[in-house]
């Protein structure tokens, strides 16, 4: 199957390219505009897989560029759509950027799906669409309090667009994957999360602080109604997330969907607090993390973790990496990018 991966140089996209290569049976092309990544990622993928991925620079928010690409590449049978801005905090400060980029990108890609009748589509969604929830763990049908940030709203809107689109195209197939909190790095330590901008995701902040790249990290809030007062999330290893995409593509290709669009949670099913994540990192690495408590951050949800039994029962996916595995792999990656060899 020929598969286009938008945002393929990004964190989850790059790990998914590795899993697709390791699985075999897929011809991939990565599409990325490198707004928060670099083409150097492909060299790291080649070190792991032995093969340099095929890639093109493409801004999926550019309608004409997307149309031209798919007109020139008519053999594509599947799309995994990662490309999106994803910072909750930035989306609160600059909502128009998020509404424009995330929604326009999806619409442009779906126009190509419609024009070329591309049968298989996987959409990168988020648990943030649930908002604050009292009934945990979260199931796919759970109705939350509503989104807490423009980023989350773009994912919710994206799901609505997909629902409407696939009602009109019953012969095409779509799987929506709602990620909880992807963390960690490839077990080789050769590839991991490396945003061009200052990171705001928890684990890169932890590793950067431990490595001395920043003097101190902030824990936003210690008076939530949780075990230790800090936010609770469902952290899941990025390679587990990537593997879910391979299994989802296989599932789409076999035509075993109960209906032509399905939604699945991707999480471990266990809630971990920010403080607990820091303590896990300190335990497995022996490094201390200098942190202090700061006021709550606008847009943050108090606690959320998943019920991922649906994807286990229907597709056969389940996570294999522990929280300690996630933290150790992230530290291995941090040490790799800090080494003189890696930066020559």
Image: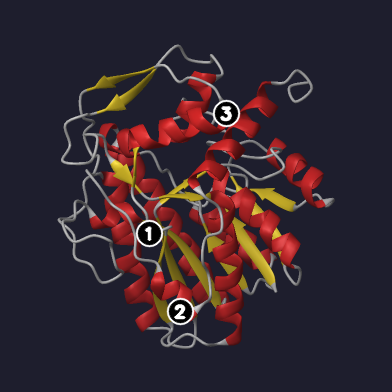
Of labels 3 and 1, earlier in sequence is: 1
| Distance in Å between CA atoms under marks 1 and 2 | 15 Å
Compared with 309, 129 (above or below) is above
What's the coloring here? secondary structure
Classify mark 1: helix, strand or loop.
loop
Category of crowding for the residue at label 3, using alpha-carbon neighbours closer than 10 angstroms: few (below 14), some (14–19), many (at least 20): some
Q: Residue at x 53, y 21 (%)?
A: 287
| Distance in Å between CA atoms under marks 3 and 1 | 24 Å
Q: Is residue 258 left or right of residue 57?
A: left
Residue 63: % across, % down:
49, 56
Q: What is the count of numbered marks?
A: 3
- State the mark number for residue 269: 1
Task: Name the residue that disc number 3 marks.
Answer: 285
Residue 263: % across, % down:
39, 71
Q: Is residue 200 left or right of residue 76?
A: left
- State the mark number for residue 313: 2
Q: Residue at x 34, y 22 (%)?
A: 218
Of labels 2 and 3, earlier in sequence is: 3
**Residue 14 appears in the figure:** yes
Compared with 195, 255 (above or below) is below
Classify mark 2: helix, strand or loop.
helix
Judging depth in this view, the residue of 232 and 170 nearest the camera is 232
Compared with 161, 53 (above or below) is above
Q: Is residue 222 left or right of residue 56?
A: left
Q: Quadrant of the C terminus?
A: top right
């Amino acid at each position: 199957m020929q598969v286009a991966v938008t945002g393929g140089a990004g964190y989850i996209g790059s790990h998914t390219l590795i899993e697709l290569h390791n699985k075999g049976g897929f011809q991939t092309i990565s599409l990325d505009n490198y707004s928060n990544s670099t083409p150097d990622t492909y060299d790291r993928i080649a070190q792991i897989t032995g093969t340099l991925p095929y890639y093109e620079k493409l801004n999926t928010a550019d309608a004409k560029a997307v149309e031209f690409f798919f007109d020139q590449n008519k053999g594509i049978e599947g799309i995994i759509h990662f490309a999106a801005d994803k910072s909750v905090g930035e989306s609160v400060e600059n909502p128009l950027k998020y509404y424009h980029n995330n929604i326009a990108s999806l619409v442009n890609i779906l126009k190509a799906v419609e024009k070329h009748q591309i049968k298989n589509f996987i959409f990168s969604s988020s648990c943030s669409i649930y908002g604050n929830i009292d009934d945990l763990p979260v199931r796919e049908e759970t109705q939350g309090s509503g989104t807490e940030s423009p980023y989350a709203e773009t994912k919710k809107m994206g799901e609505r667009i997909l629902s409407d689109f696939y009602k009109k195209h019953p012969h095409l197939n779509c799987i929506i994957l709602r990620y909880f909190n992807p963390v960690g790095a490839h077990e080789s330590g050769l590839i991991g999360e490396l945003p061009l901008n200052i990171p705001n995701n928890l684990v890169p902040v932890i590793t950067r602080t431990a490595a001395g790249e920043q003097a101190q990290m902030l824990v936003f809030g210690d008076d939530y109604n949780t075990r230790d007062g800090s936010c609770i999330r469902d952290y899941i290893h990025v390679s587990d997330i990537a593997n879910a995409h391979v299994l989802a593509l296989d599932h789409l290709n076999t035509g075993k969907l109960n209906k032509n669009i399905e939604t699945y949670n991707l999480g471990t099913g266990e809630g971990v607090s920010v403080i607990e994540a820091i303590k896990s990192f300190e335990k497995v690495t022996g490094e201390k993390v200098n942190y202090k408590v700061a006021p709550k951050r606008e847009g943050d949800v108090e606690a959320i973790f998943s019920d991922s039994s649906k994807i286990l029962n229907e597709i056969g996916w389940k996570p294999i990496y522990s929280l300690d595995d996630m933290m150790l792999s992230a530290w291995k990656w941090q040490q790799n990018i800090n080494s003189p060899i890696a930066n020559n």
